């Protein structure tokens, strides 16, 4: 079964450094997402990406963050100058479509498939 | 997206059905009910979603009340591997600026041997 993959699984960096988190979405998916989860807290949406542009972003996704799809398979999240509070688990997700127009059951067009996450530790 | 209310935790015996409730009394007519789960430290996993009809797939069943103000996720024969946090998410169809999943605190389901 196809799955979303993420690298690295764990990244340790010094405050102020730039980090790039990498994701390979499922190959026929068109919508891509980043979420994060600070330890013990909720999963929070960061950004969604479709057709080579950001389609929605949260307040967390400020100028320190950027996303890119540099080729046909990778989707990256860059944090320009990391802060201590950026320490979190970062999840990439992808979906075939973004819509919720079909009913449930075996339909697989709308749901987001998540990767295993990258644990980012900022020291 | 409508707000949801779930109990913070539930227990279930292995092999028995687990019934996880969710209240979404402010749901709008075009909003879907999605269920995801997160096994410790892993990425969220899609389970099922529905609009107004009951739905079943290989993982679970989703029962939505007629007034759509609440729903129940049913895991028919819970196993130890079903121990996870279960999230009920109400979400409008995509379009405009609506792409994200909004996760709450969910219900921690513990399946006991």
Image (spheres, coloured by chain):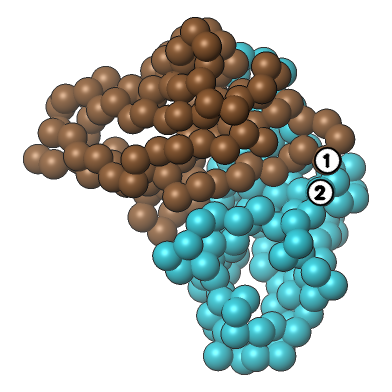
| Chain corresponding to brown in the figure | B
What x and y, as percent, mark residue B113?
A: 9, 40
User: From the viewer's perspective, is residue B31 above or below residue A114?
Assistant: above
Q: Residue at x 51, y 36 (%)?
A: B4
Residue at the farthest front position: B26
Q: According to the image, label 1 marks what residue?
A: B97
Chain A: what color? cyan
In this rendered view, identify the residue nearer to me: A85 or B83. A85
Q: Is residue B54 visible?
A: yes
Quarter location, residue B86 = top left
Q: According to the image, label 2 marks what residue?
A: A56
User: From the viewer's perspective, is residue B28 above or below residue A95?
Assistant: above
Q: Are marks 1 and 2 in contact (CB under 8 Å)?
A: yes
Q: Are marks 1 and 2 on the same chain?
A: no
What x and y, as percent, mark residue B14?
A: 14, 33
- Subunit bearing disc 2: A
Query: Is A64 placed left or right of A120 in the picture?
Result: right
- Subunit bearing disc 1: B
Is the residue marked by circle 2 packed among few (<14), some (14-19), or many (20+) residues within 10 Å?
some
Q: Secondary structure at mark 1?
A: loop
What x and y, as percent, mark residue B63?
A: 42, 15
Q: Residue at x 53, y 26 (%)?
A: B25
Quarter location, residue B49 = top right
What x and y, as percent, mark residue A71?
A: 84, 55
């Amino acid at each position: 079964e196809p799955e979303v993959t993420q690298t690295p699984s764990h990244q340790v960096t010094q405050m102020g450094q730039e980090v790039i988190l990498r994701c390979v979405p499922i190959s026929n998916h068109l919508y891509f997402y980043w979420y994060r989860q600070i330890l013990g807290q909720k999963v929070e949406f960061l950004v969604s990406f479709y057709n080579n542009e950001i389609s929605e972003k949260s307040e967390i996704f400020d100028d320190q963050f950027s996303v890119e799809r540099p080729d046909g398979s990778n989707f990256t999240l860059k944090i320009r100058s990391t802060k201590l509070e950026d320490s979190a688990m970062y999840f990439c997700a992808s979906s075939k479509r973004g819509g919720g127009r079909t009913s449930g059951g075996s339909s697989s067009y709308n749901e987001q498939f998540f990767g295993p996450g990258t644990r980012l530790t900022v020291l | 997206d409508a707000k949801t209310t779930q109990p913070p935790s539930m227990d279930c015996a292995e092999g028995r059905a687990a019934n996880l409730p969710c209240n979404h009394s402010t749901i709008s007519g075009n909003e879907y009910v999605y269920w995801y789960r997160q096994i410790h430290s892993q990425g969220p996993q899609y389970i099922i979603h529905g609009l107004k009809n009951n739905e079943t797939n290989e993982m679970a069943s989703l029962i939505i009340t007629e007034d759509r103000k609440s729903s129940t996720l049913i895991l028919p024969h819970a196993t130890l591997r079903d121990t996870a946090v279960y999230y009920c998410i109400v979400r409008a169809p995509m379009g405009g600026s609506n792409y994200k999943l909004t996760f709450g605190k969910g219900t921690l389901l513990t399946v006991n041997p």
